[in-house]
Amino acid sequence: MTLAPETQNRTTSVDPRTNHVGTGAGAGGTGTFDPDRLIDERRSGYCLDAPFYLSDEFYRRDIDAVFAATWIFAAAAAEVPEPGDFVTIDIGDYSVIIIRDDDEEIRAHHNVCRHRGARLLSETNGSVGNIVCSYHQWTYSPEGDLMSAGVQAPGFDRTCFSLRSVSVRVVAGLVFICLAQNPPEDFAEVADRISPYIEPHALGKTKVAAQVDLIEHANWKLVMENNRECYHCEAGHPELTCTFFPTYGYAPDEIPKRLKPAYQRYLDAEERLKTNSERNNLPTQLIAELSGRATGFRIERAALDGKGESYTMDGGAASAKLLGELDTPELGRLSMHTQPNAWFHFMGDHAVTFSLIPLGPDTTRVRSTWLVHEDAVEGVDYDVENLTTVWVKTNEQDAALCAKAHRGISSPAYVPGPYAPTESDLEEFCTWYIERLQAHRAQTDVRQADQGGQS
């Protein structure tokens, strides 16, 4: 692909953080730029301009327009297996409690006391009987009802001071939340379409075998873009490519000669997967709707290399106890991406969930969680190191690559380059992202107009 002349000559005359000549913006993208113009003039087929990755302005917009306005993956239901079990998740200035109540229902509440606003739970996970504010001991049930508030003035009505709820939806054992007052309505349709793919893996009867948090020194969008392509896998992930075919993203007639043997193994493995999937009544058809809608997603069952059973160094099953009623471990991988923050792999013997949360313009937390059958015994049915090695090493390698990308984009010499044909999912992600920024801006303009009319 040939770059346009104006793009080829931008490196010395235009600061890419600002798209203005001679702005002198320092590292971090703090120079003067017009965010709305960058949004509206985003060049299709190319990486984003530097301020999208570097600036505090876009970080704030990302929280408001993306993470606080769309459905995001928060946890596996297996992370809160018993009544009173909770996890907390911090998103920008928000903090959310996800808790299983006494009726086994999973709830989500803002982590803010209704008295004077103190943070209720500081731990990332744990178990409580009731939620007690350590400041003045206001006490809430797992359902969010205010149970005790000490001595109050006559006429005080506890029912008016329940915890503020957060929209929550459990989809086949995966917990999604939305901070918006009016969450995108298309999520119900997405849930109905992906559930038949995931339900045979019976995540409701799994337990957490391992969980690893990794802090990556890169903007969250770089982390997502890195995850959406395997252009870098052959050179960057020796452990992953023991089982993950490096031909992902290539059209059949564009497979490089060096990858032809891997592609033939893929075709053979796909035939075996088709037979095993049909016998187990597992849907395999690709659904890819990553942009053009509020809840972008992609789901597909595909073959694995090696023994074709799991993400291990030889492709063999990592757990002796299969999930659900599955009759063979050779079921490849059911992979799912959900915008803006998660990706998943479901195998016959275990599942792995991955989620990210931006901690700042240049810092992202990536959480990986391995789920095995609830009756699987560590040291007997599975070995944690064997279960986790491939993705632990892959995530560490990705973290290093993303940090390099962020450092490079921080240079005044950075100019957005074109996506390769195998990086079509990156284009879909960036398209979806720009759509979300534009939709949020339009909603904000309407609210401001309404407020102006009322004043």
Image: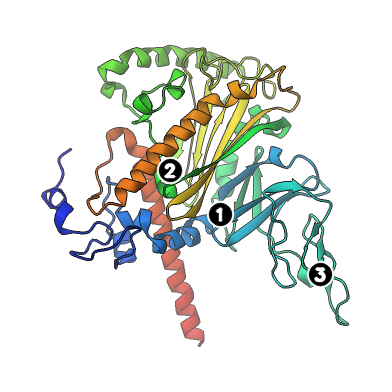
Q: Say what secondary structure mark 1 lies in.
A: loop
Count of labels in the image: 3
Q: Is residue 381 above or below residue 147?
A: above
Q: Residue at x 75, y 72 (%)?
A: 115
Residue 185, label in figure: 1
Say what amino acid the circle numbered 2 marks. Answer: Val
Spot occupied by residue 161 in the image (x, y as percentages of width and height): 77, 70
Q: Nearer the viewer, mark 1 or mark 2?
A: 2
- Give the number of the disc on residue 412: none
**Residue 299 horizontal/vertical position (percent):** 50, 34
Give the numbered dot on residue 223: 2
Quarter of the rendering containing residue 437: bottom left
Q: Position of residue 37 (x, y in %)?
A: 29, 64
Q: Nearer the viewer, residue 418 or 301?
A: 418
Q: Residue at x 42, y 66 (%)?
A: 441
Mark 1 and mark 2 lie on one chain; the one further toward the N terminus is 1
Q: CA distance from mark 3 to mark 2?
A: 43 Å
Element marked by disc 3: helix
Which residue was labeled with disc 3? Answer: 159
Screen quadrant of the N terminus: top left
Q: Secondary structure at mark 2?
A: helix
Amino acid found under the numbered disc labelled 1:
Glu
